[in-house]
Image (spheres, grey):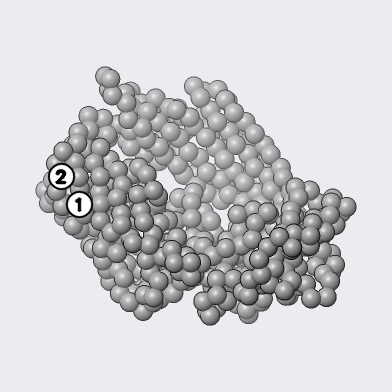
Amino acid sequence: MSSPDRSGELLTIADRVVAMAAPGEQVEAYISRSLSTEVRVYEGEVEHFVSAQSEGIGIRVIRDGRTGTSYAGTLDPSQIAEVLAEARDNLGYGEADEWAGLAVPDGVAVTPQTLWDPHLETTPTARKIQLAKDLERMALAADARVRVDDSNYSDSFGEAAVATTTGIRVAGRENGCYLSVGTLADDGDETQTGFGFTVGRNVDELDVEKAAREAADRATRLLGATKPASRRVTVVLDPYVTAQFLGIIGGTLNGESVVKGRSLFANRLGDDVASPLLTLVDDPTNPLAYTATDIDGEGLAARRNVLIESGRLGMFVQSSYSARRMGATTTGNGVRGGIGGSPSAGCLALQIVPGRRSQAEIIAGIDDGILVQQVQGLHSGVNPVSGDFSTGAAGLSISKGTLGAPVREFTIASTLQKMLLDIAEVGGDLEWLPMRATGVSLVIHDVTMSGA
């Protein structure tokens, strides 16, 4: 039987904190309670098992443009009073900021979602362990050259509540799980790595066989890889690589990056910044997204925001703070890293609207190209202001519509601006990943490949 939703208890505590606000103060109480399970299996035995619970409160106090914060990993009433007192004390250490302030209700209704699955809550620990063991066994059985580095099961259950003196008062809960496996493939003196994963709201949604097969394929495919010849080439980004690429793009499409001069898209609203084939949305209201949520980190309703539509830049995501600085309105994109920090603007669940063709169908139409399956140093190789892009990569060559020999130790380089404009096709192979972006195969023309 599923346990009752106790997030209302957290909201009651938050209400008590807000009621202690002094005249002239804005006060926010953010309270969370979580439970997680982590299992790691190696050679058929449990190598690591942790079931952890945590709870805590973070309080923000804003007065005269100054912000004071404090937090504690307890919900003991006497400790909560100390957290509030400390937040007030910390007001004196910050500089005054004319845009400082809490979010206010904006009238956007919460999109109903099913973010809590009672079946996950009642899953026996023994089954969670068995899933990790099954994943290891299947990955080993997929190819005789494969070893498993580790096989993992992970789940999380979270309840949270936010209350403010500005009228926000919300609470909710969500849970989810995933399996992941790291593989090694050996051939003589050479070793290559791979990985696979599967996500779901409950364990019955986890595709163990698919995760095992992909982990084995990713490692064995690259055995015997050589350095390709340098040239300009069409690349096909594997869905996981596309998701990493979107993470970079998403970081430049928020209001805080723009006002701080850290975005190549500043002053480009309304411009055609990508191929007409690209429509990019941030949609945490899609329950299939691993990071789906009904409210953002400030307690406002999460919503579907279309950032780039048919290549045209339509909007930036905004927290209440970045919106005030830009003279815009919040988009329900306050992202909170935990109870101890203040929310910032950020994407919650990025997705490219998918096309229709599978990766195999796409590759069949490419005469000369590279299927990029791995990238290294992506974040350090990208300048979010200039857009300069350069990263190490590995993958498979494409010749006359057929996947060929594995290649590695090469660099792909361009600019983010050019890559977005040179998108030639968006795949229909949408993959939901345990991160803030989904993946699809993405075809990009005219990328510089530096190899042999």
In the rendered image, residue 387, in percent from the top left (x then y), is placed at 33, 60
Q: Earlier in the sequence, mark 1 or mark 2?
A: 2
In the rendered image, residue 69, in percent from the top left (x then y), is placed at 72, 59
* 224 versus 63 height, above or below: above
The image quadrant that residue 170 belongs to is bottom right
Secondary structure of the residue carrying numbered label 1 = strand
Secondary structure of the residue carrying numbered label 2 = loop
Residue 152 appears anywhere in the view: yes
Viewer-nearest residue: 448 or 394? 448
324 sits to left or right of 192: right
Q: Residue at x 72, y 69 (%)?
A: 62
401 sits to left or right of 34: left
Q: Crowding near pointer 1: few (<14 within 10 Å), some, many (20+)?
A: some
In the rendered image, residue 253, in percent from the top left (x then y), is placed at 43, 66
Q: Residue at x 64, y 34 (%)?
A: 50
Q: Which residue is mark 1?
A: 448
7 sits to left or right of 80: left
Q: Quadrant of the C terminus?
A: top left
The image quadrant that residue 293 belongs to is bottom right
Q: Contact, CB < 8 Å: mark 1 with mark 2?
A: yes
Viewer-nearest residue: 59 or 15? 59
The image quadrant that residue 113 belongs to is bottom right
Residue type, mark 2 in image: Ser
Mark 1–mark 2 Cα distance, whole angstroms, equals 8 Å
